[in-house]
Amino acid sequence: MTTTSVLLAVGQALLLVGALAAVHVPLGTYLARTYTADGHTRVERGIYRLLRVDPDAEMRWAAYLRGVLALTLVSIFAVMLLARTQDRLPLADGVPAMSSHTAWNTAVSFATNTNWQSYAGETAASPVLQAVGLAVQNFVSAAVGIVVAVALVRGFARAGTDGRIGSLWRDLTRTVVRVLLPVAAVAALVLVAGGVVQNLGSPAEVSTLAGGTQTIVGGPIASQEAIKMLGTNGGGYLNANSAHPFENPTPWTNLLEMFLILVIPTALPRAFGLMVGDRRQGRAILATMVTLLVGSATLLTWAELAGPGAVPAAAGAALEGKEVRLGQAASALFAAVTTGTSTGAVNAAHDSLTAPGGGVAMFTMLLGEVAPGGVGSGLAGMLVLAVLTVFLAGLMVGRTPEYLGKRIGRHEMTLVAGYVLTMPALVLLGSATAVLVPTADAAAGDPGAHGLSRIVYAFASGANNNGSAFGGLAAASPFYDTAIGIAMLLGRLVPIVLLLALAGRLASASSVPVSAGTLPTHGPLFVGLLTSVTLVVVGLTFIPVLTLGPILESLS
């Protein structure tokens, strides 16, 4: 690892941290006010009238959940319909209709904020499907993730409300109108200024230097790129995703895209602290997220610049699958950011990461994407782990655990346990099934440790609603489209059911006074405990399969 490489990696990380720190307080405060303000804007009132809903009618958790489920199912149906009929839509330019299994996978993927793509965006998805179907879901699915987290925060902040955790339609409308749309609009303009393509023209035929012709596909890329990053979605307009110069042309647009990925997840902990009336609680959650992200980024950068396989003979660096205009350091940092959140965007081929680098990216994703996680889902996942931490600490000292004035008992821990176990069950069962199905196993393209890593990564990406992939897996098949679609749907909806049930139960409970024996949950001790629990829970679950995959590949 050269001094120049180290300085470049540190410089990029410091620029990113500085930008996030500059907006942390104002954005976090704005988010808290967004979900606690009483008034409605004129645009919002118009939307409520159109939807025929009362924004001031507070919902119990079950009604809130029914709304989320209904919205998700309608979204899946709408995107499937567009995908199956896109050849008959305007601007299709010969793009065929998607097969039934690809349409299912795509619809579930974008409705669940996963944005896994088993198709090539520039050749298999028309501009209408991209803009009307997929980009709209980028807003809606991101908003759902945020409002579920807000509902859980209200569960901690309220007491004796008969399980009422807010109005889903008010929360969704405010999230889109006050947060996602304005920020995405500004980001899209900045990306256009940076060279990202934005047009509605037909593909252009150009002559190459070799005397042939090449089809250059454009489209409304910048507008989709902005919300793809801001909403931690990740589905690229083009097949190469953020490695393509039309989506990510320069080093500074690369930094901007990482900033957009992280800005809401890192601001939500402050909003959480303000909403529960103790900013120290938000700082503790953020400190844990940052600790995990810094560890991931450091290990990935080391793996790509100096780890095993990083300096092959006569090559000087592990440049395979990476864009020269961005470099290894930026690729490693981007990989840590995208797997630490529920974003599926990539600016390098993860399949070409070194063995330890790919293992770190996979492990970061398997943490449950809480470093800092997706918009809303990261905060919610970290709060669940915080409840688990105080429960374990209570067992060690023989006290009934409490968190933010709420007593944690058997019913709460049943919901927490279900949440923690859902993702590992989907990943391990899905991977085991794929290994046992001959055609699915063969699609990994490698009978050894790397092939297993490709399969596990795919189901980890689906069940965690991430969307990135080890590109060597031939996933465009009925088996993988169906199986990963199921993993995405269950990986999204089962945790939401458990989170909202937990929110309703907490909101119904009375607050208990803080006593001398209550574990402080705002200091370095709790940050250390929470970080340890997060790592241990993942380690005990996934170390065996990681040993057979990336660890074995690293040793060989």
Image: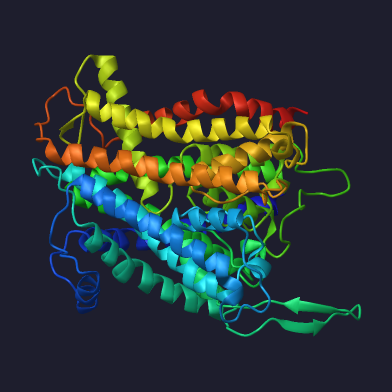
* The C terminus lies in quadrant: top right
Count of number-bearing discs: 0
Q: Tell me which residue sits at (49%, 46%) in the image.
A: 488
Q: Tell me which residue sits at (57%, 65%) in the image.
A: 84
Query: Do we see residue 55 in this rendering?
Result: yes
Percent across and percent down for residue 428 are: 55, 31
The answer to whether 46 is drawn above or below residue 285 in the figure is below
Direction from residue 352 to residue 458 in the image, left or right: left
Percent across and percent down for residue 517 are: 16, 22
Front in this rendered view, residue 29 or 413: 413
Indicate the quadrant where residue 409 lies.
top left
Query: Do we see residue 196 in this rendering?
Result: no
Q: Pick out the residue farthest to the right.
A: 210
Direction from residue 5 to residue 252 in the image, left or right: left
Front in this rendered view, residue 387 or 132: 132
* The N terminus lies in quadrant: top right
Percent across and percent down for residue 166 are: 18, 54
Indicate the quadrant where residue 291 lies.
top left
The answer to whether 428 is drawn above or below residue 281 in the figure is above
Q: Tell me which residue sits at (54%, 80%) in the image.
A: 193
